[in-house]
Amino acid sequence: MLEIKNIHKTFNKGTINEKKALDGVDLNLNPGDFVTIIGGNGAGKSTTLNAIAGSWLVDEGNIIIDGVDITRLPEHKRAVYLGRVFQDPMTGTASTMSIEENMAIAARRGHRRGLRWGISRKEREEFKKKLAALGLGLEERISTKVGLLSGGQRQAVTLLMAAIKKPKLLLLDEHTAALDPKTAKKVLEISDKIIEENQLTAMMVTHNMKDAIAHGNRLIMMHEGRVIYDVSGEEKRKLHVSDLLKKFEEVSGGELDNDRMMLG
């Protein structure tokens, strides 16, 4: 479903602030893979997701989704292949529009837009059904402006919107980092449910090692713009945080200095 071939990205080339963000990343995802991505600050986690989404173009290498080379496509032309949820619950939805209006916009992504606007009874019932599955009571608040929702409720709606067209690839960029632990746990449960029910291929960046181990079928660790560890299946299920810390020291040659990962 996803092929990343030897991608490189350097910011501020030729200046004193030059930073090599990606240094030859290679990664293949099979359909249905749910990959969690961990690493210290500046490891290249979010940069990889941004490269896939087209937030910036890579300096070299190729990015292929379901057989289509999207390496040079602008961001808006990649949207048909991707769903994305950001760290900030305020991003990804229109706060002054209702829940159903936001969901209608997501459901019509990729369709030609005309002057006619309206939500049919069939659409509304389908939106209510999807919202009811979240277990948050939002199906009874479908006309509520999204800006009045809590951070967790808003992220749950954003997840529904990101998955509503069943994208080739779902990108979750630290989408629980701004939430309190209890809400974050609920949003992760909803993420698992949506990914499994829609049989999506997904990538999730997280600083929480326990979450990286508990979710998904595969885990990769990044360091200095490279993938330094890739584990899946039974081996991943048997991992403990101590194993990840030891592995990081083995392959990077140093101790992890990221407080968020250590505390998480």
Image (spheres, rainbow, N blue to C red):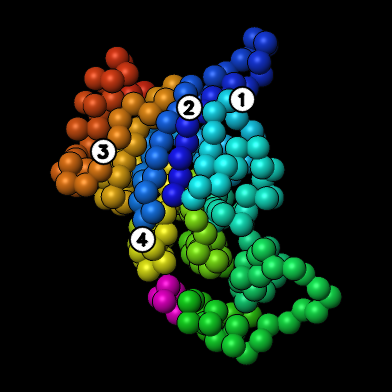
Q: Are there few (<14), some (14-19), or many (20+) residues within 10 Å of tag 1? A: few
Inter-mark Cα distance, 4 to 3:
19 Å
Query: Can you tell which mark lies on residue 192?
Result: 4
Query: Can you tell which mark lies on residue 231?
Result: 3
Residue 13 shows up from this direction: yes
Query: Mark 4 belongs to which amino acid?
Result: Asp
Q: Are there few (<14), some (14-19), or many (20+) residues within 10 Å of tag 2? A: some
First reached walking from the N terminus: tag 3 or tag 2? 2
Residue 260 shows up from this direction: no
Query: Mark 2 belongs to which amino acid?
Result: Asn
- Check contact, mark 4 vs mark 3: CB within 8 A: no
User: Percent position (x, y) of residue 119?
Assistant: 68, 82
Could you tell me which residue is drawn at 56 percent across and 54 percent down?
Answer: 81
Query: Can you tell which mark lies on residue 59?
Result: 1
Local SS, label 2: strand
Could you tell me which residue is drawn at 30 percent across and 45 percent down?
Answer: 218
For mark 2, what is the residue? 6
Inter-mark Cα distance, 3 to 2:
19 Å
- Which is nearer the eye, 123 or 210? 123
First reached walking from the N terminus: tag 4 or tag 3? 4
Query: Is residue 189 shown in magenta?
Result: no
First reached walking from the N terminus: tag 4 or tag 2? 2
Q: Which residues are magenta?
A: 132-137
